[in-house]
Amino acid sequence: MTRVETKERNRRALLDAARQAVARDGHRARLDEIAEQAGLTTGAVYSLFGSKNGLMTALVTDYLGPHYEGMEQAAPVALDLVAAVDAFARYYRRVCDDPDALRHLSFEISLQDMALRDPELQARLAASIQAHEERLAALFAGRSHHGATVTPQQARRLATALRALLVGLSQGVVLGPEEAAPESYFADTARALTAPEVLGPP
């Protein structure tokens, strides 16, 4: 195994161990236990991520990666804005049916709890959320909508509202009865955000 391959293997092992530790222990997750579970030392954490917060930030990026890929595939560029938002919302609802959805939600809430207790991690998590919204905005900017083209400013407003809506609905589905919010409801409420009064001026 090459040095690069070894580094990537160690990085992956630490990320996997950290995700399990955060989901299980929340803010009490200990760096030495994470390293031990990965079969490494805390020195490897500092070498690869710089600090515990660096590891947590990388964990968020690693966690969101598949979501980015999925949402971009769910809303191909050929769709107009309304169709893209509809497709994206339906994709988001289907993610709730993942057998690991409750475990993923536990991880997200635990990470937020950690961030509330650590200003540095809070700033890093906020930056990660902002990057998520920017990527979501880029997914919608430039699409056709009622004879016009969605501007970057409109796409950012939509991304902020859409993320808040779908995160809230998803938590309700994962924690409550599935019939409370079917796929069609996700799509209907998401499409409502494409109204001119929500998108705002170009």
Image (spheres, grey):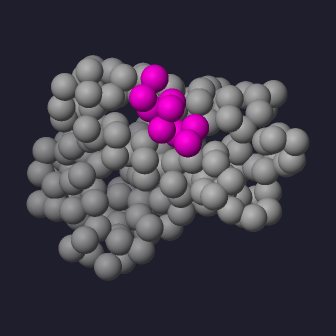
Q: Position of residue 9 (x, y in %)?
A: 44, 37
User: Foreground residue, 184 or 18?
Assistant: 184
User: Foreground residue, 122 or 34?
Assistant: 122
Q: Residue furthest bottom?
A: 119
Q: Is residue 102 above or below residue 126?
A: above
Quarter holding residue 130: bottom right
Residue at 28% from the left image edge and 60% from the top image edge: 112
Q: Is residue 191 left or right of residue 196?
A: left
Q: Main secondary structure of the magenta part?
A: helix
Q: Tag count in the figure?
A: 0
Magenta extent? 184-192
Q: Is residue 170 left or right of residue 126?
A: left
Q: Position of residue 190 (x, y in %)?
A: 52, 39
Residue at 53% from the left image edge and 57% from the top image edge: 160
User: Foreground residue, 160 or 148?
Assistant: 148
User: Foreground residue, 24 or 172?
Assistant: 172
Quarter holding residue 10: top left
Q: Is residue 47 visible?
A: no
Q: Position of residue 179 (x, y in %)?
A: 26, 21
Q: Position of residue 44 (x, y in %)?
A: 35, 56
Q: Is residue 174 left or right of residue 56?
A: left
Q: Is residue 191 magenta?
A: yes
- Quarter of the rendering occupied by the C terminus: bottom right
Residue at 86% from the left image edge and 47% from the top image edge: 148
